[in-house]
Image: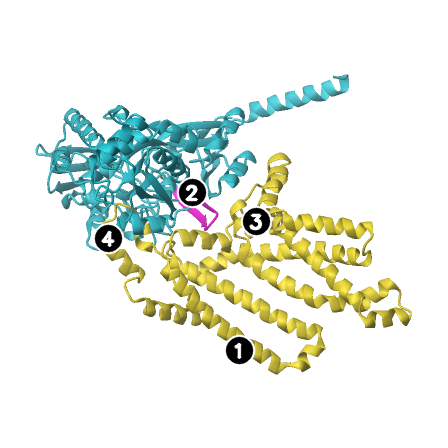
Amino acid sequence: MLRYALKRLLSLVLSLAVASVVIFAVIEVAPGDPASFMLGVNAQADTLAALRAELGLDVSKIERYFNWVGGMLAGDFGTSYTYRTPVSQMIADRLWVSLPLAIYALTLSTLIAFPAGLYAAARRGKPGDVAVMGATQLGIAVPNFWFAMMLVLVFAINLRWFNAGGFAGWENGLWTGLQSLTLPAIALALPQGAILARVMRSALLDILAEDFMRTARAKGLSRRQALWRHGVRNALIPVLTIIGLQFSFLLAGSIIIEQVFYLPGLGRLVFQAISARDLIVVESVVMLLVFAVIMVNFLVDLAYAAVDPRLRSRT
Amino acid sequence: MTKQRFRSFASALALGASLFATQTLAKSDITIAMQLEPPHLDPTSAAAQAIDSVVYTNIFEGLTRFMGDGSVVPGLAESWEISDDGTVYTFKLRDGVTFHDGTTMDAEDVKFTLDRATAEDSANAQKALFSGIETVEVVDPLTVRVTLKEPNGNFLFNLAWGDAVIVAPESIENIKTNPVGTGAFTFGDWVQGDSITLNRNPDYWGDQPALETATFKFISDPTAAFAAMMAEDVDVFDNFPAPENLPQFEADPRFQVLVGSTEGETILSTNNKQEPFDDILVRQALAHAIDRQAIIDGAMFGYGTPIGTHFAPHNPAYVDLTGNSVYDPNKAKALLAEAGYPDGFETTLHLPPPSYARRGGEIIAAQLAEVGITAEIINVEWAQWLESVFKGKDFGLTIVSHTEPMDIGIYARPDYYFQYDSTDFQALMDTLNSTTDPEERDRLLGEAQNLISNDYVNGYLFQLAKLGVAKAGVQGLWENAPTAAIDLTGISWDE
């Protein structure tokens, strides 16, 4: 187990190093100067030069790369060019929205997917299965930003149960915060839940065809008992993979939903920073997201090993 | 209606009436949405208009200020005297004005502000506004004498800009995140990415505003903007991004729609140094190939005033020159043939993100195609536009709204991105700058408008409209936008 973990850890560090070079190169190559963006069309050349010096943009790119990486290793993500606040603080603020939103959405999608997948697998080929599969097909097909707008139309504009967007803040109480995240979480959870339900169903069906399931039935377990005791646990591996992928996606990829609900999350921060050429913010946030994705994969790898003892010895 | 129902209906009415009668205190908070979030809150070191929208006249005030109708009136300067040769301005400051941190606003602060703006390492985005200043002297705590290198008829106007607001040396260090000014509102809180809250300043030198708190919310997506307004999450949308939805608000008694004008001359900017646009015949052909009204209708859903020169129609000195460039594709073709391009030519059309450019650009490209000009559309982000078009001058055509007030002076800068180099125009601007007589200034401005219109420097499209949406009970909003500002001091609720 330890060897396995160490190996995974090494590949994690290498991935991060490669990612940092790629991110920096891609973002620095994009045309656009942060200083002239900030000062606009009437800025004079001397003003621009003064600002560039103030932002530390007057040194070479290679030097900037090492300053950036060195800073991050020391826990300093730098200072935003436009906001002039520490990037780490901005990220922390935004994480208070993005992280709960991702967890909320993932919880919802799992809550939808598990029963739906189990139900469909247990009733393979029957009308119940067909209905669930049809519904998940629809859930995957519907674009989540459109679904989000429909939610706003119904629950915010017509019924007035929720605000149309914005984030009320956790300081006003857990419920207020959760309330402003509910519609976005539902919008995010629907397609994810649909995918997860299908994965759950097919994983279970695969397992049901296995010899050990027949053995379980033969030794006298009922269909349902066999499904619960031996089926679900073995079906968890592909499901965990998908959940891991989904979590990283929800953390980084909710940018459109954040835009529709004007939530101050990480996705919107990146979006704003890209258009303002706030390079340091883009680089640091993207790096953080890469780190999160790699970490989640690492944890999922470890979780495999926990679920499936064969993986521990194999490596 | 049954009796029972009627009774409850009547009691509901009575309850409503009594509520109405006892409700003597009007609502004193407001939520105002805008599309862009300010990067920080120092109007004296960035070009972002969103900064001015939040802080101008609310947190910070200048020696002079703009009113909603575009006029310039005394601000922190109570009065001033101008020497006969127009180079020395002596400002008398208001007595008893304090900054939000309790320090007194006096002549030293004014000197500090102006010196900071003109300093070598100044980060002021409009440094040119102050470039004529020779010295700033403190005469006594309430008197400042500003000496100019040469007369400048625009000086009081320049001082009204958000970039010229008075700041204090005591609070300058953290001004970007904790702005301390003299205005009727103090900075409250900023949840980055979400909202900024301002609170009434009880120690304000002027009249107390009706509002106690104001929250600015940032909603960039047009669909989200529509939803937020419809769900009544916000009370006002400063500049509504989706003109196609305005009829819906107009038809809804819960809302009012304010259609005004901005200082944004939207132009088809033309690279005057690039072939074939260095030929006036080609530029003239361009002007006749464009159907302004079709662009206003198609891209802006009818909102916008046609212009024939680079000047705001609501300005008293405006001259209507749209007649110089009437839509006439046949004439355009004839002009192109005369210029030696009977089969037209190919060029590029760079379009920045705003919808006036992206939507308008599609229409213009189609109109140009009709006279034989193939314009390749290149969509760019602002940062890219600044880099390649504005700085690199690597473009044929582009569509931009020039939102700075009274910016006809940019035509006197031969290195400005559209590269119009006319000694006549430059001489005219020199005369204008040294003229202080209002009537003579208007005449010169008219002459300047004619000159650039007759030279067909750029394609003049329309004056960008300001489209505000607000709840029906909100009063005192600026209809026009003489500068980017949401002046909270005059806003109140009528309910």
What shade does chain B have?
Answer: cyan
Q: Which mark is residue A47?
A: 4
Residue linked to disc 1: A10
Along the viewing direction, whichever of B77 and A175 lies nearer the viewer:
A175
Front position among marks 1 and 4: 1
Residue linked to disc 3: A172
Front position among marks 1 and 2: 1
Of the image marks 1 and 4, the number of the one nearer the N terminus: 1
SS type, badge 2: strand
Taking the image as shown, residue A132 lies to the left or right of residue B144, namely right
Quadrant the N terminus of chain A occupies: bottom right
Task: Tell me which residue sits at (81%, 56%) in the image.
Answer: A124
The subunit carrying tag 3 is: A
The subunit carrying tag 1 is: A
**Tags 1 and 3 touching, CB below 8 Å:** no
Part of the protein shown in magenta:
B186-198
Marks 2 and 4: same chain? no
Front position among marks 2 and 4: 4
Q: Which chain is yellow?
A: A
Residue type, label 2: Leu
* Residue B154 coordinates in the image, percent (x, y): 19, 35
**Tags 2 and 3 touching, CB below 8 Å:** no
Task: Tell me which residue sits at (45%, 52%) in the image.
Answer: A271
Residue type, label 4: Thr
Residue type, label 3: Asn
* Residue B371 coordinates in the image, percent (x, y): 33, 33
Farthest residue toward the front?
A: B343
Residue type, label 1: Leu
Marks 1 and 3: same chain? yes
Task: Tell me which residue sits at (58%, 67%) in the image.
Answer: A296
Q: Which mark is residue B198?
A: 2
